């Protein structure tokens, strides 16, 4: 017969459970200019994202936020997505002038400033600047200047800053692939 004593210590297990990484399921929404103004398409999006377990949509906005009605629709959509558990919502950005110009109501930064609640806001920006090939925005040196401005803005405003990259290559040849990779790792929260 065993006797339970009040001073007994429960043994600590020797095997600790594995740490499970939480991975975001990211989806770029490239046809968003046709979705946001259309109530039926917005409703379909609000069904699609949670059903497919998307945790971080990235919206290609184009000039959508230049229109005050669209800014109102975006605030409502972000709030509704937040209520559905989609708490990470990114605006796709390319150049700092197009992203963080607070005097332009159509930029993602100015949009966030105009929001009343946190659930209306974008929680981060996602960069896509194809410096590995000829493009209208410029080479890696030009990218770095703009990228640093967006990074600093995101840091100052508690936003995450992600980037999509196909190659660690500077089309102009001024930076090595290792220098490109080092920059991307240093100044972005997630690299796609």
Image: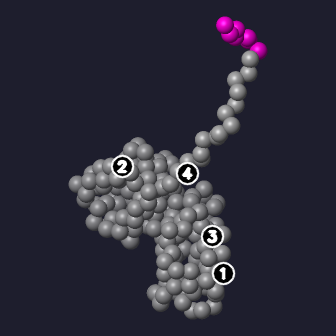
In the image, which is nearer the foreground, mark 4 or mark 3?
Answer: 4
Secondary structure type for disc 3: helix
Residue 109 position within the rendered picture, expressed as x and y whole percent measured from the top left:
52, 63
Name the residue tied to disc 4.
Answer: 21
- Name the image quarter holding residue 188: bottom right
Seen from the viewer's position, the closer of residues 79 and 2 is 2
* 65 over 25 or under it: above or below: below
Question: Mark 1 or mark 4, which is nearer the start of the sequence?
Answer: 4
In the image, which is nearer the foreground, mark 4 or mark 2?
Answer: 4
Name the residue tied to disc 2.
Answer: 50
Secondary structure type for disc 4: loop
Report, in whole angstroms, how far the alpha carbon at label 4 lies from the one at label 2. 20 Å
At 60% across and 58% down in the image, what residue appears?
157
Q: Residues within 10 Å of mark 2 (few under 14, many from 20)?
A: some
Disc number at residue 185? Answer: 3
Name the residue tied to disc 1.
Answer: 179
Question: Mark 2 or mark 1, which is nearer the start of the sequence?
Answer: 2
Disc number at residue 62? Answer: none
């Amino acid at each position: 017969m065993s006797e339970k004593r009040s001073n007994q210590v429960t043994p600590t297990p020797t095997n600790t459970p594995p740490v499970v990484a939480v991975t975001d399921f990211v989806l770029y929404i490239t046809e968003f200019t046709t979705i946001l103004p259309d109530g039926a398409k917005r409703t379909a999006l609000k069904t699609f994202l949670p059903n497919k377990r998307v945790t971080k949509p990235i919206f290609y906005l184009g000039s959508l936020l230049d229109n005050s009605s669209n800014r109102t629709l975006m605030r409502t959509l972000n709030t509704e997505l937040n209520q559905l558990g989609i708490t990470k919502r990114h605006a796709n950005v390319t150049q700092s002038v197009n992203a963080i110009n607070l005097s332009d109501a159509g930029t993602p930064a100015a949009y966030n400033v105009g929001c009343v609640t946190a659930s209306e806001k974008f929680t981060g920006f996602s960069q896509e600047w194809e410096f590995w090939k000829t493009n209208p925005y410029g080479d890696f040196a030009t990218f770095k200047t703009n990228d640093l401005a967006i990074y600093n803005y995101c840091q100052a405003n508690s936003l995450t800053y992600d980037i999509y990259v196909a190659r660690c290559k500077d089309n102009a040849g001024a930076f090595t692939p290792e220098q490109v990779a080092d920059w991307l790792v240093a100044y972005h929260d997630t690299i796609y």
